[in-house]
Amino acid sequence: MSAENTVSIENTVSAKNTVPAENSNVERQVGTARVKRGMAEMLKGGVIMDVVTPEQARIAEDAGAVAVMALERVPADIRAQGGVARMSDPDMIAKIMDAVSIPVMAKARIGHFVEAQVLQAIGVDYIDESEVLTPADEAHHIDKFAFTVPFVCGATNLGEALRRISEGAAMIRSKGEAGTGNIVEATRHMRSIRAAIRSLAAMHPEEVPAAAKELAAPLELIREIAAAGSLPVVLFTAGGIATPADAAMMMQLGAEGLFVGSGIFKSGDPAKRAEAIVKATTFHDDPEMVAKVSRGLGEPMVGINLSDLPDGQRLAQRGW
Amino acid sequence: MTETGPIVGVLGLQGDVLEHRRAVADCGLRSTVVRRPAELARVDALILPGGESTTMSRLLVAFDLMEPLRARLASGMPAYGSCAGMILMSREVLDGRPDRRQLAVLDAVVRPNAFGRQAASFEADLDFVGIPGGPIRAVFIRAPWVEQAGSGVEVLARVPEVPVAGSAAGRIVAIRQGSVLATAFHPELTGDRRVHQLFCEMVRLSNEVPVSARYAGESGTRARGA
């Protein structure tokens, strides 16, 4: 992978948004790593829900969502309808931002830095450079350091997560397989990332460079993780969560919070299911609570078996 | 870690709970996560962490914590709130949501997201009353400010009056009222522990009945009504 990003500097917002005070040494710094990563820290233990209308956004907020992801179609519909999936209509995103007080995220296509510029211009709180949309660049992800607004990116394994962090991602979500209502890929990706971190943490220092080569990620970042025993950014999970038990399992596997897409608004009673998933996330280690909130939720979304998906329709394979 | 001394609870419904627990440990006090009324009854002080105040407010009601927490705060339990915690403890929130439930232990009116959305989140150096050793690095994330503070509220920090601060110049961002401390920013995200040290001193000096004295006879039975 080339380290050089082809994004021209003139076309992007300056990474150094430091505003110096005229007659003072006091300054306000925006867009710092601490401010970007810190924003994700505030979402921990929470559920971020996909919404397509202001009404759904309000339902999500009332259910206790910590943020909403504004998009035109949930992944299950993108799958069903096919075609090229792009950034949502800015007008629709703005209406959702007006409807709720919680943060609003929106998706840009992998590598589509102009969609990201547009989302920053609208004022969204976080950008998801997402494999759920059709990739716009097959060689390069967005240079995320060039933006004031923070980015979350998907990953199927630790190497992929670290490549995204080295491009400036301030939050990682395991990819799972969006729009399937099937938790199996989310489980695979979360276990893979967690196991690789544990393995690094147990390594002798002289073994770390070889691990960096294998993971195809920067050595400095790998050393940081080996020393800390954790990622330098918050790790959420996504893709296939449909029930409170799915949510609690991902939290017990080491996710710090969840993205739920089609699982809520493609179910029989979205408001009730959304609230149940929020409660099961908070009390993920309390089976009695998970049992209590799982009762009488109505129909879950209809799931898809991964073996029924042709190779070209596996969204998690987008990005690298 | 010390085996005795006060226990600081950190409200664990959502948010940066772990960062506050690390800060408390660095100040030499024990901490525990509070998600249930029974857990609240066992702590000597409480930190309300950063997170989403709308979410935490709803979960406080859903998990039957709102009233017990109000009662403990009224009886003088030391509490510290950063960002969302400041919003939750204030008397009034200027966000046009009449259904919002407040702990209302601070005589303050706060404006959430006062500085703007995430792109306007920032870091700056602030002077903090009662904290020696120079300015502290303050991290503001979709932060509130205090629009009005009552006469019993001590103002501890303001946004510096510099041209770059614009309409935020002079806004109140840290307050104390009796045993309750609140900041609009997140000291738990920096390695500087001076704000948490200030709070831990408040906990050590607290006159609220120490937790060991609250249990009499049978273990787990509270001697004092909440």
Image (cartoon, rainbow, N blue to C red):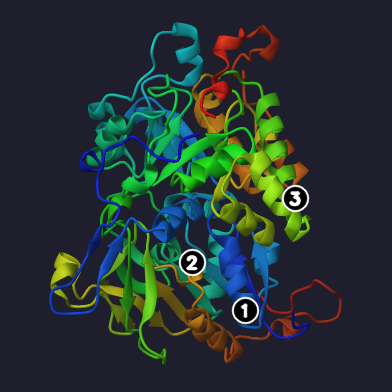
Assign the C terminus of chain A to one quadrant of the image: top right
Dots 1, 3 in contact, CB < 8 A: no
- In three-dimensional space, the C-alpha distance between marks 1 and 2, rounded to whole angstroms, equals 13 Å
Vertical placement of residue A290 versus A314, above or below: below
Q: Which residue is mark 2?
A: B189
* Classed neighbour count for the residue bearing mark 1: other residues with Cα under 10 Å, few (<14), some (14–19), many (≥20): some
Q: Any mark on residue B26, and which?
A: 1
Look at label 3 and name its amino acid.
Arg
Percent position of residue A3, x then y: 45, 40
Front in this rendered view, residue B61 or A195: A195
Look at label 1 and name its amino acid.
Asp
Q: Secondary structure at mark 3?
A: helix
Q: Secondary structure at mark 1?
A: helix
Using the image, name the chain to which the residue with label 2 belongs.
Answer: B
Q: Which residue is mark 3?
A: A198
Q: Is residue A141 left or right of A279 when viewed as pictured?
A: left
Q: Is residue A157 something one can see in this rendering?
A: yes
Front in this rendered view, residue A250 or A299: A250
Q: Is residue A149 left or right of B64 when viewed as pictured?
A: left
Q: Which is closer to the viewer, label 1 or label 3?
A: 3
Look at label 2 and name its amino acid.
Leu
